[in-house]
Image (tube, rainbow, N blue to C red):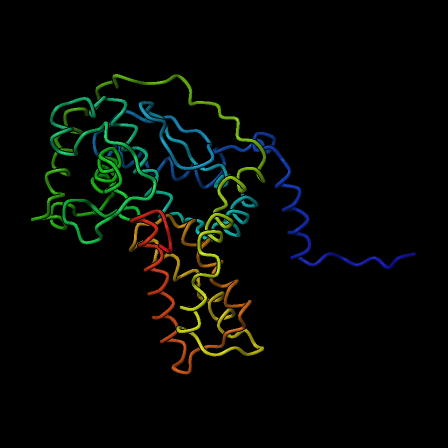
Amino acid sequence: MPEFREQTPREGWESEKLAVLSKKIQELQLRIEGTPLESAMKKLSDELDAKGLAFRPKVYLSDEWGCPEGVPVIGIPFYLADERLKRLEDEFSEDLEDDRLTMMYLRHEAGHAFNYAYRLYETEEWHLVFGPYSRPYVEDFQANPFSKKFVKHIGGWYAQKHPDEDFAETFAVWLTPGSEWREKYKGHGALPKLEFVDRAMAAIGRTPPAVDVDAPPQEELGTVKEHYESRDEHDRVAAQIAGYADGDLRELFGPENEADGAASWADANHRRIVKQVAYWTGARQAVVLAMAKHLIERLKGMKLSMPASGEVEALVRFTAMMTALASNWVRSGKFIEL
């Protein structure tokens, strides 16, 4: 008779993870009620009430943060409604938001919802302040980190992506308690945008919206595994970089050895590097993360050691290299131009 061995916590999680990945998202019967998301929604409602606004966008669980174009509702990522899914999201994206970031996204999406609910984007003044609503969306856009024309809210200079995002980010800064936006943006090109939001929201007040919905949309989201497969950037990024960065990695790190010192160091430090590179270049974090993991695979394959100058030098070199690659991606859609 085989000896019974109790599963370790790690083994137990791996078994549970496989079971969750195979389920359709609807089968998980996720709810906002009774989770920390309910408290976040209450906080958003209190902030809107403090600004004298009566409209409350309806919310639903979706595959990502969002507000369908023209529809004043807020989609919240489904994984925030379940602790197991939060852990899975953190393993996959390494970017699970905390309560503070959840509120930042809620304020941003509320900005979209108010824009659509009151059709502000159809007014001439909105176009004069924010630009043409009809401008095409570009997924990886060239951001100017030092521009004074835009507010800073969500990482990656998101206000610069599109006039609609500019309004949503401006609304979010205006709504945030204690933001002191008049003082912070004094003399900036972003101040007239904040003043427009302040005037527009004062005019809206407690008037009913021009557009509303009885219920949020119902989405077919597939399985949890399919959700993460659709977001995986690794193969596409690896195919682009391939071994073209090997020579640069050899210059940045030391000679080959058997300890894989460079790969181990990069793996231990890549989270903080990825966040900073994504923030300052405006590249999507999923792309930067895939790039980092591919470079770590190359370091491991070449068995490179740490530079003789030490970890600080390694951090500067590796971060600079990743920033250059991410900037190329944002500018041209390519990491390396041959």
Question: Could you say where residue 71 lies in the image, as x and y percent from the top left?
Answer: 34, 23
Q: Nearer the viewer, residue 78 or 136?
A: 136
Q: How many numbered dots are placed on residues in this image?
A: 0
Q: Nearer the viewer, residue 219 or 215?
A: 219
Q: Nearer the viewer, residue 128 or 199?
A: 128
Question: Could you say where residue 281 lies in the image, as x and y percent from the top left?
Answer: 30, 54
Q: Residue at x 48, y 42 (%)?
A: 231
Where does the C terminus fall, quadrant-wise?
A: bottom left
- Residue 55, quarter of picture: top left
- Residue 45, quarter of picture: top left
Considering every residue shown, the one lying at the far right of the view is 1
- Residue 249, quarter of picture: bottom left
Q: Is residue 155 visible?
A: no
Quick check: 263 left or right of 284? right
Q: Is residue 165 above or below residue 288?
A: above
Q: Is residue 232 above or below residue 44?
A: below
Quick check: 53 left or right of 44? left
Q: Residue at x 29, y 17 (%)?
A: 211
Question: Could you say where residue 290 lies in the image, as x and y percent from the top left?
Answer: 46, 53
Q: Is residue 189 visible?
A: yes
Q: Residue at x 7, y 48 (%)?
A: 187
Question: Could you say where residue 303 lies in the image, as x and y percent from the top left?
Answer: 54, 73
Q: Nearer the viewer, residue 279 or 236?
A: 236
Considering every residue shown, the one lying at the far bottom of the view is 308
Q: Residue at x 39, y 16 (%)?
A: 214
Considering every residue shown, the one lying at the far front of the view is 338
Where does the N terminus fall, quadrant-wise?
A: bottom right
Q: Is residue 259 above or below residue 268?
A: below
Q: Is residue 318 above or below residue 92?
A: below
